[in-house]
């Protein structure tokens, strides 16, 4: 499949995200207050159209700056894939954050290769599979996460 080959300018995205944060918050609050009937369908269509034009391996900034939250099922699946004991896997890669969630000890993600490909792609955590959550149903239910996500992404550049 043909991918769009625009230059990725992370500084520009950072500035735009900061400049437009108020507008985005207002827009998302409006969606939450009165979600349009076709919102799920529209969000899915836009998500699919945008991702036809994006080649994540050109950047992989998400995997360099935002780690996933790990579920117990993720940990067991990836540990098994790496032929590691769950306890050893957790001790090597994970920590518990201030909210009690399991997250990576360090970033960029240690499973990200120099080619920007994920070395555990087939068994990657659920949060990685679903990121950036722009095609999920009732997207207005994660407005805070949506704003936080882009702020975190841009502020870590
Ligand atoms: S596990 Fe794979 S998809 Fe998830 S952050 Fe690491 S490199 Fe990216």
Image (cartoon, rainbow, N blue to C red):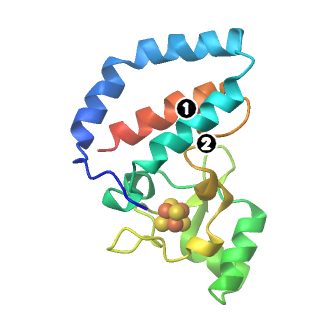
Choose top left, top right, bottom left or bottom right for residue 152.
Answer: top left
The quarter of the rendered structure image containing the C terminus is top left
Against 111, residue 140 (above or below) is above
Q: Which residue reaches farthest bottom? A: 83
Which residue is more in the foreground, 55 or 62? 55
Q: Which residue is mark 2?
A: 133
Q: Comparing marks 1 and 2, which lies closer to the viewer?
A: 2
| In this picture, residue 93 sits left or right of residue 14 | right
Q: Position of residue 8 (x, y in %)?
A: 25, 47
The residue at 67%/51% (across/down) is 101
| In this picture, residue 17 sits left or right of residue 71 | left
> Marks 2 and 1: in contact by CB < 8 Å?
yes
Mark 2 falls on what kind of element? loop
Q: Is residue 105 visible?
A: no
Please tell me which of labels 1 and 2 falls first in the chain.
2
The residue at 25%/47% (across/down) is 6
Q: Which residue is mark 1?
A: 146
Q: Position of residue 145 (x, y in %)?
A: 59, 33
Q: Is residue 53 visible?
A: yes
């Amino acid at each position: 499949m043909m991918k769009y080959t625009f230059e990725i300018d992370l500084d520009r995205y950072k500035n735009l995200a900061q400049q437009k944060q108020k507008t985005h918050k207002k827009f998302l609050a409006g969606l939450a207050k009165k979600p349009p009937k076709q919102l799920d369908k529209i969000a899915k269509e836009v998500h699919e159209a945008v991702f036809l034009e994006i080649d994540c391996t050109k950047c992989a900034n998400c995997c360099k700056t935002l780690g996933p939250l790990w579920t117990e099922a993720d940990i067991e699946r990836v540990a098994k894939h790496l032929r590691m004991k769950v306890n050893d896997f957790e001790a090597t890669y994970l920590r518990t954050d201030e909210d009690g969630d399991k997250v990576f000890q360090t970033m960029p993600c240690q499973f990200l290769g120099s080619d920007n490909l994920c070395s555990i792609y087939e068994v990657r955590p659920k949060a990685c599979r679903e990121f950036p959550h722009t095609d999920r149903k009732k997207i207005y239910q994660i407005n805070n996460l949506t704003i936080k996500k882009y702020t975190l992404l841009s502020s870590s550049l």
